[in-house]
Image (cartoon, coloured by chain):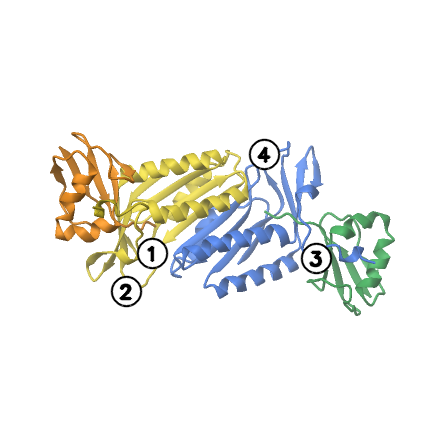
Chain colours: A blue, B yellow, C orange, D green
Amino acid sequence: MLHLYDGALDVPKILKAWYEEESQSNYGAYIPFVGTVRSEDGIDGLSFDIYEPILESWFLGWQEKAKAKGAIIKMAHSRGDVMLHESSYIAAVFSPKRRVALEFIDAFVEDFKASAPIWKYDLKEGKRLYALERSTAIAGSGLLSQR
Amino acid sequence: MLHLYDGALDVPKILKAWYEEESQSNYGAYIPFVGTVRSEDGIDGLSFDIYEPILESWFLGWQEKAKAKGAIIKMAHSRGDVMLHESSYIAAVFSPKRRVALEFIDAFVEDFKASAPIWKYDLKEGKRLYALERSTAIAGSGLLSQR
Amino acid sequence: MVRVEFLGPIQKAPLQLEITNLSELAEILQEDEAMRAWLENCAVAVNDMLVSSLDVELKDGDRVALLPPVCGG
Amino acid sequence: MVRVEFLGPIQKAPLQLEITNLSELAEILQEDEAMRAWLENCAVAVNDMLVSSLDVELKDGDRVALLPPVCGG
């Protein structure tokens, strides 16, 4: 359940669709995390590049971790430009129990930030500027700088 | 932002309304927690009693904790009967930053379970049975059993 | 008079009592066989504020509430 | 031939190289002045699997990708 969209996400529509998809699945807890573009540093918006093959295998790994706990995860992300106060990211967990759901959404969102192959750019004064200082090197980076 | 409803919650409608209410507030993270009635132990549904004056003061305390972190919280809960696969509870946090939001929703939901003056009953075979074994004594309980 | 209310699942009608503190209320309720199990796991609120000591003075018009174990969500 | 791709913000066209392992690739890219800063913070994938050692053999048709620091959400 990995959905990529061009531009901003329709958050109410996605939250509703996911809730209804699982309405008979007997999960007791549903926790979506919604990420929205904030106005800061004079940006007009953000823009995203995604490398889908690795995103998909990363997400598959998390689906298996969820399954081992009786839970499921869903995720939606934007490609390209997303303007101020629009949303670019939704991750959600469904689980029978609340503790599993609360811990899972936290671990998933943090690993997403550290590992998902998505690159963020600030849209500012007509330019698209890589947000290097807010980005995280994937674990194991630097391999090719070895001698 | 404490909303009490008779019967099941309209989850998509509430999630949408809250998202839209804060669409210009410059929060980067929105995390709702949705609680849904699970089929277990042969129940037909759950039923809730709420003591509103203390629920409101408890919620007010959490609103102030949220404010101190630059965040806000909203909550909706059902009164009376909620049947299988319907939802009875939504709590949501909005925050500029994801770490605050992830930690806040966890702490809020756990304290809600331990402290909010709401009583749960199983609806089973036409009866309304207090769910004592799944309930938690509020901190400081037992005062009147002292001699 | 102090009004004493029993919330949620406790099947007991409110009481109107001439008492001046919570210790007196504890004594009265402990004599009620059906209330004893509840007393052990109930929290107590005076005028909708939870209290943690029996040394709370009560005055005419005060309201005391007993809150049994909770389970929202 | 092995195809080497530079993902996200790295402004560099793909390369087609006759190499048999990642150590050879490291040598070649380290000679490119503009690439040196990227090499320090890039992860490496071979055929879309992240790798953690230079001792990976490469064969004709393999694809190597360099992944600079990420920031989804």
Q: Contact (CB < 8 A) between labels 3 and 2?
A: no
The location of residue B82, given as percent across then percent down, is: 29, 52
The residue that label 4 is drawn on is A39
Q: Marks 4/1: CA distance? A: 38 Å
Front of the two marks 3 and 1: 3
The residue that label 2 is drawn on is B42
Where B125 falls versus C35 (above or below)? below
Front of the two marks 3 and 2: 3
Q: Going by the image, does A65 lie left or right of C18? A: right
Residue at x-position 20% and y-position 53%: C37
Q: Residues within 10 Å of mark 1 (few under 14, many from 20)?
A: many
The location of residue A144, given as percent across then percent down, is: 79, 57
Q: Marks 3/2: CA distance? A: 50 Å
The location of residue B27, given as percent across then percent down, is: 52, 37
Q: Nearer the viewer, residue A131 or A14?
A: A131
The residue that label 1 is drawn on is B37
Provide the secondary structure element on which disc 3 rests: loop
Q: Quadrant of the N terminus of chain B?
A: top left
Provide the secondary structure element on which disc 1 rests: loop
Tell me the kind of residue under disc 1. Answer: Val
Q: Marks 3/4: CA distance? A: 32 Å
The chain containing the residue under callout 4 comes to A
Q: Contact (CB < 8 A) between labels 4 and 1?
A: no
Can I make out residue A95 in this image?
Answer: yes
